[in-house]
Amino acid sequence: MYHFFVEPGQIAGNVLTIEGADAHHIRDVLRMKKGEAIEAVDGTGRIYTCHVADFTDEAVLADIEAVSEAASELPCRITLYMGLPKFDKMELIIQKAVELGAACIVPVACRRSVVKLDKKKEAGKIARWEAIAEAAAKQSKRALIPEIRPVMTFQEAVAEAKEAGMILMPYECAGNMARTREVLADIRPGQRVAVFIGPEGGFDPAEAELAGEAGAHVITLGGRILRTETAAITTLSILMYMLEGLQ
């Protein structure tokens, strides 16, 4: 069943109105007919099972058949602070982070970031990344579209992450896998979890020290050096596995 996101204002009584690009997609790309089933999420955790009732020039009207609570979100809000990589990698990371349950993705300008994002181009890049996040959220049937934040400095990211209940920093210079397992086992439903992943060049030792001073758990992902995109996907995969189904 196709999955769409709507605002609460698009729901009136038992009728849901889908507008804009999604309406075009339903009518002109998918070529759906009256009576076909669709699924919509309103961003508050409610899922609406509907069937297409009618078409107008600007919208698709759907009759709501059932309302249920979404079960696709993890019990912890995970924010990925991603050391700014090359842009093709960032697109892959955003797509997979959304599929794996991240609630927010923040690009971070680290000391060893290869790419320096020009402020003039930042708005266009973020719009592109937001579109990728929305498409991935639809594909994976998320209950929300994860937020893509503007680029932060590393210092700004660390200061913000202090508000989280748990800060994780996989770091190639860390060791002790047993300690990593202990830290991850301490994560509890309802916590906010901040995950820091370094860019292609890794974290500068001063950045790791600053994060540690802020309360970050500097952990290892094993005895191999992982590419930045692999490290992000691996960390989020581990968290998803540990948290899935916990309430």
Image (cartoon, helix red, strand yellow):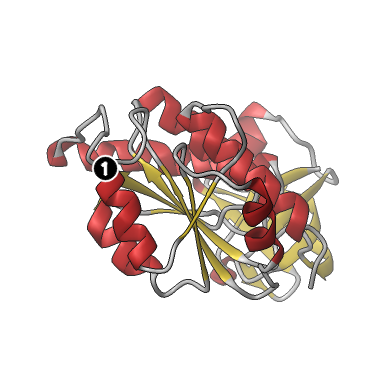
Q: Left or right of 78: which side holds 27?
A: right
Q: Position of residue 110 (x, y in %)?
A: 26, 42
Quarter of the image for the N terminus: give it. top right
- Residue drawn 55% across the image and 58% down it: 103
Please name whichever residue, 66 or 246, is drawn nearer the observer in this view of the structure.
246
- Residue drawn 70% across the image and 30% down it: 30
Task: Classify 10 Å Cα crowding around label 1: few (below 14), some (14-19), many (20 and above).
Answer: many
- What residue is disc 1 on? 110
- Residue drawn 30% across the image and 36% down it: 125
Please name whichever residue, 201 or 244, is drawn nearer the observer in this view of the structure.
201
Q: Where is residue 12 in the image (x, y as percent from the top left)?
A: 65, 73
Image: 96 above or below 215? above
- What residue type is disc 1 on? Cys
Q: What element carries label 1?
A: loop
Quarter of the image for the C terminus: give it. bottom right
- Dividing the picture into quadrants, the one containing residue 220 is top right
- Residue drawn 80% across the image and 43% down it: 34
Image: 221 above or below 213? above
Q: Can residue 33 be seen in this view?
A: yes
